[in-house]
Image: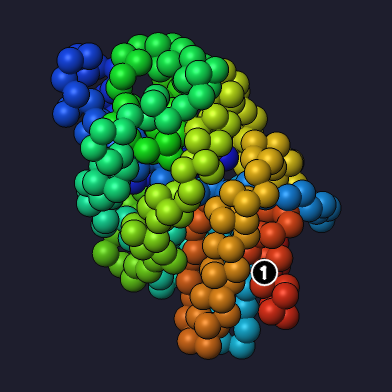
Amino acid sequence: MACAEWSPYIGQTGAERVPGNDRPMLLKRLASSAAALLLGLTGCAGVGVETPPPGAVPGPALWEVADEDTTIYLFGTVHALPQGKNWFDGRIEQAFAASEELVTEIDLAQATASAQSLAGAAQLPEGQTLRGLMAPDKRQAFEASLVSLGLPVEALDRVEPWFAGMTLSYLPLARRGYETQSGVELALAGRAGEAKKRGALETIEQQIALFDTMPMEAQLAFLDEVVTAMPESANSLDAMVADWLEGDAAGLAKLLNAELDNPALYQRLLTDRNANWAEWIDRRLEQPGTVFVAVGAGHLAGAGSVQDQLRKRGIKARRVWQ
């Protein structure tokens, strides 16, 4: 389920290198992999149509929201990328250089704490196991997915379904060469150094609660979707990254939308959060300055997107083409 999460905040999992009988180390590694997914949802957006002007240069989509004394750039990111992808073009460089503040989905400095928070929140009550909560046919498919990754079938027995879904979303991508160290937010943070202020739209606790407070039935449905999508997840992400690099927001939205057909999850992970972020942008326009907001690309594409939510507030986001 490629739409679930791509994040820059945690390093490689190393799960495949952990001996099968070393459960504490394995859980720690899996907590890191799930954190790599949880922190910074890409979202799964509807489809919008955009016609680039003559002379438009391909590149990741960038938008601008501005009034008399405030400019807010909205940049859609991919949280994990293969090495060597060149995305920091002249448009993005100019906007980033002009910005005094970098705002991301969560505080990047909280990355280490995120894995610890996840490991605690994801534990099932004593006496319960993940596979024990699953219907027999779902359990069989789940166990097969673990074996395909070189993990023992009991590797995730002590964690809740949402956490297992996060982990299984990330591991195939890591095998494909997608690295959190190559993710966009980490690159931007490195370029910002100490020169720019930092801000965040959400907290670690809020992002964990998005999943941890879901009813068990919804969590199991999410895990089932992840397991079903696993064989093609890396290919799907390749296609999404290709559209992202071209700046094809409509194409990216279409691919993302195909990954999530659960309306309640769609509302919870995408639409509601985008509305909250639009409110933040609306308030931020009351303060002078220039801000560079970097969030998962799916949040900035199509129906229910941040731009959609801003339009409801009478605020226009202009696409920066060149």
- The percent position of residue 312, horizontal first and vertical second, equals 72, 75
What kind of residue is marked 1? Gln
- Residue drawn where x is 58% and y is 24% of the image: 228
Q: Visible in this render: residue 302?
A: yes
Q: What crowding class fits label 1: few (fewer than 14 Cα within 10 Å), some (14-19), or many (20 or more)?
A: many
179 sits left or right of 124 in the view: right
- Give the residue drawn at x 55%, y 62%: 273
Colouring mode (rainbow / by chain / secondary structure / one colour): rainbow
Residue 40 position, x and y percent, is: 45, 50
Q: Establish if 128 lies above or below 149.
A: below
Q: In this rendering, would 67 be left or right of 97?
A: right
Q: Is residue 55 above or below residue 167?
A: below
In-image side of 288 versus 20 (left or right) = right
Quadrant occupied by the C terminus: bottom right
Q: Does 294 sit above or below residue 20?
A: below
Q: Position of residue 250 (x, y in %)?
A: 75, 47
Give whichever of 132, 6 is nearer the camera: 132
**Residue 297 appears in the figure:** no
- Which residue, given by chain and number where applicable, does mark 1 sit on? 309
Count all numbered tags in the image, as a single digit: 1
Judge left or right: residue 214 versus residue 156.
right
